[in-house]
Amino acid sequence: MLITLIGGMLAGAVIGVYEDALEMIAAVAIFIPVIMDMGGNVGTQSSTIFTRAIVLGQISEVRFAKHLFRETKIGFTMGIMLGTLAGLVAYIWQQDVNFGWAVGISLVLTMTIATTMGFFVPFVLVKLGFDQAAGSDPVITKVKDISGLLIYFFSVSIFLGQLM
């Protein structure tokens, strides 16, 4: 719970840094939950897939890299599909192609990182002798929240910098 509290404070700090952007472009705030929630969902699913595979003996140290790469590809593919859809919605809603790009690219990167972390973190916890079932979600959630917000606000500043 301490990790969750500290991570939440760090995520709040990231939002605070970009407060001016949020004030100038209110639509940016609308997509924060989308970016964070989609990353959270795929990170949790990836963690569950890892847990199931390790319990069934389908993952070994020798083959871990292959499984991690496969999971990362799946996250990237889902990110491309959902990022394209979300980017189109953002573009149509705001009539701004740059806003669509910022949302779409952010979702692709966040989902890719979240699936990778969802598979990698439990593996590391197992290797360190910790209970990965209890420890994975707080770590994955906070890394994904903070990285997702940084990616999103960085994308917004690149694609919509002229408006800020």
Image (cartoon, grey):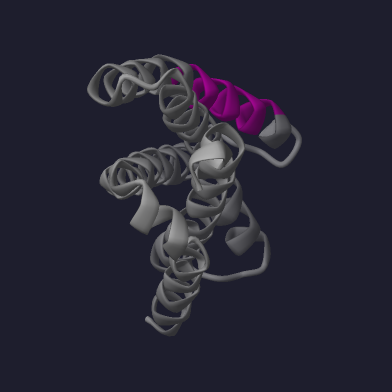
Q: Residue at x 31, y 46 (%)?
A: 37
**Is residue 22 depicted above or below 96 in this figure?**
below
Where the N terminus falls, by quadrant? bottom left
Q: Residue furthest right?
A: 62
Question: Residue 113 sits in which quadrant?
Answer: top right
> Residue visible at 42% across and 58% down?
141
Residue 72 in the image, given as x and y percentages of width and height: 58, 29
Horizontal side of 4 relative to 90 (left or right) equals right
Q: Which secondary structure dominates the residues rendered in magenta?
A: helix
Closer to us: 95 or 126: 95
Left or right of 29, for residue 98: right
The span picked out in magenta is 66-78
* Quadrant in which residue 15 is drawn: bottom left
- Residue at the spot 31% in from the left edge and 19% down from the top edge: 95
For this view, does 113 lie left or right of residue 97? right
Query: Where's residue 96, x and y in %?
Result: 38, 22
Asked if the magenta segment contains residue 67, the reply would be yes
Q: Which of the two residues, 22 or 152, is positioned nearer the viewer here?
A: 22
Please say if 129 is above or below 147.
Answer: below
Per the image, is 55 magenta?
no
The answer to whether residue 113 of the structure is visible from this angle is no
- Residue 48: give x, y in percent of width and height: 38, 44
The relative height of residue 1 versus residue 8 in the rendered view (above or below) is: below
